[in-house]
C-alpha cells in the first residue's frame, strides 16, 4: 500500500468518525433542549409564574446572602 492510499483511507475513516461524533453531539443537544423545554417539539407551555431557582448556584447565593445579613457575634474593632 503506498502513502497516497494510506492518506485517503485515513481521511475517509476520519470523516466517518467525525460524522458519527457530530451526530451523537447533535442528538444529545436536541435531547437536552427537549428536556428543559427549549424546542418547539415537546416544549412546555410558557407560564407567567416565576419558578424558584434550585440549582447549586442558587443555593450558594442564598447561603452567602443569609450569612451576610446576620449581625456579627462581636463588635467590630477599629
Image (cartoon, helix red, strand yellow):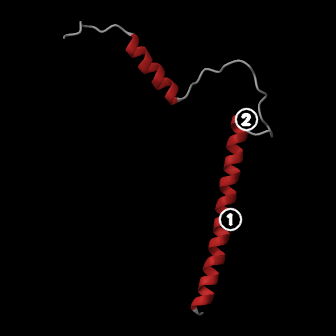
At a point 63% along the width and 77% down the height, the residue shown is 11
In this rendering, the answer to whether 55 lies above or below 11 is above
Would you say 48 lies left or right of 11 here? Answer: right
**Contact between labelled residues 2 and 1, with CB atoms less than 8 Å apart:** no
Residue that label 2 marks = 37
What is the number of callouts on the image? 2
Q: Which residue lies most toward the front here?
A: 78
Residue 34, labelled with which disc?
none
Q: Secondary structure at mark 2?
A: loop
User: Residue 67's spot in the image, x, y percent?
Assistant: 39, 15
Query: Mark 1 to mark 2: distance in Å?
Result: 27 Å
In this rendering, the answer to whether 15 lies above or below 46 is below
* Quadrant in the picture for residue 46: top right
User: Residue 36's spot in the image, x, y percent?
Assistant: 69, 35
At a point 70% along the width and 38% down the height, the residue shown is 35
At a point 64% along the width and 75% down the height, the residue shown is 13
Q: Secondary structure at mark 1?
A: helix
Using the image as rendered, state which of residue 77 and residue 33 is in the foreground. 77
User: Residue 72's spot in the image, x, y percent?
Assistant: 30, 9
In this rendering, the answer to whether 73 lies above or below 17 is above
Q: Which residue lies most toward the bottom here?
A: 2
Residue that label 1 marks = 19
Say which quadrant the N terminus sits in. Answer: bottom right
At a point 70% along the width and 58% down the height, the residue shown is 23
Say which quadrant the C terminus sits in. Answer: top left
Mark 2: few/some/many CA within 10 Å (<14, 14-19, 20+):
some
Amino acid at each position: 500500500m503506498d502513502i497516497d492510499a494510506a492518506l485517503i483511507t485515513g481521511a475517509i475513516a476520519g470523516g466517518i468518525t467525525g460524522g458519527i461524533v457530530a451526530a451523537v453531539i447533535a442528538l444529545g443537544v436536541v435531547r437536552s433542549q427537549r428536556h428543559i423545554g427549549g424546542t418547539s417539539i415537546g416544549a412546555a407551555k410558557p407560564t407567567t409564574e416565576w419558578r424558584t431557582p434550585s440549582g447549586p448556584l442558587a443555593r450558594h447565593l442564598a447561603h452567602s446572602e443569609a450569612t451576610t445579613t446576620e449581625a456579627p457575634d462581636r463588635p467590630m474593632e477599629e
